[in-house]
Amino acid sequence: MKKLFLITLLSITVQTFAQSTWKVDASHSSINFAVSHLVISETTGSFDVFEVTAKAGDNFSNPEFEVAIETASINTKNKRRDNHLRADDFFDAKQYPKITFKSNSFKKTGDKTFVVTGNISIKGKTKQVQFNGKLNGVITDNYSKKQKAGLKLSTTLKRTDFNVGNPGGSVGEEVEVTINLEMQKQ
């Protein structure tokens, strides 16, 4: 029994130390969203300032994510609309300067696909959300000689669950979120 306990403890310790820190390469990454407008069109935008850190094994296995997005960095390519989205009735960027996400589980669903579950906090409200993911690949960069991983994550959020905007009106309830990441092993 003691031998089994020691082997299990050693296995957990090795797995814990096998995790490395991976940081986002923001110049090759994006956090984008799309929401319907007047039920006939779709408005898209992005958040331009964000930090993403992951703890993952070699080849970006079993990642654990932490994300912080600056709400004031919202960009829909329309200054007037962006200022309205930063205001109290939408993101209230002064009072809630960050959107955060921290994963709490990772599940492979295929050779390159996975689901990441975690808690997202927007405008003081925290909800559990699942992101569908695809690992595009892992390489060793010829220039930096560091390991890099490319991946795509997507989910759909209901904006009124987070008190972002008013129910009804011209803006759709569901917001499609797509995150394209290039992560570099530190």
Image: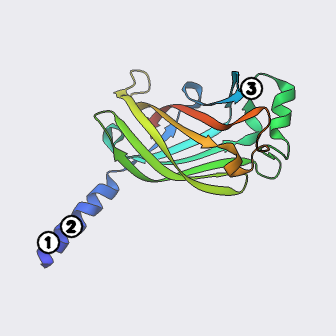
Q: Which residue is drawn at 81% across and 47% down?
A: 92
Q: Earlier in the sequence, mark 1 or mark 3?
A: 1
For the residue pair 72 and 111, the one nearer the viewer reads as 111
Pointers 2 and 3 in contact (CB under 8 A)? no
Residue 140 percent location from the top left of the image: 35, 27
Q: Is residue 82 left or right of residue 142?
A: right
Label 1 and label 2: CA atoms lie apart by 6 Å
Foreground residue among 158 and 56: 158
Label for residue 4?
1
For marks 2 and 3, give the CA distance: 51 Å
Marks 2 and 1: in contact by CB < 8 Å? yes
Question: What x and y, as percent, mark residue 82?
Answer: 81, 31
Disc 1 marks which amino acid? Leu
| Secondary structure of the residue carrying numbered label 1 | helix
Describe the element under mark 3 as helix, strand or loop.
loop
Q: What element carries label 2?
A: helix
Asked which quadrant contains residue 35, the reply is top right
Residue 146 visible in the displayed image: no
Q: How are the residues colored?
A: rainbow
For the residues labelled 1 and 3, the Cα–Cα distance comes to 57 Å
- Determine the residue positioned at 29% across, 56% down: 15
Callout 3 amino acid = Thr
Work out whether mark 2 precedes mark 3 in sequence or the reverse, and give the earlier one. 2
Mark 1 or 3: the one toward you: 3
Tell me the residue that label 2 is attached to. Answer: 8
- 179 over 165 or under it: above or below: above
Mark on residue 172?
none
Kind of residue sitting beneath label 2:
Thr
Tell me where residue 44 appears, x and y as whole percent: 68, 25
Label 3 sits on residue: 76
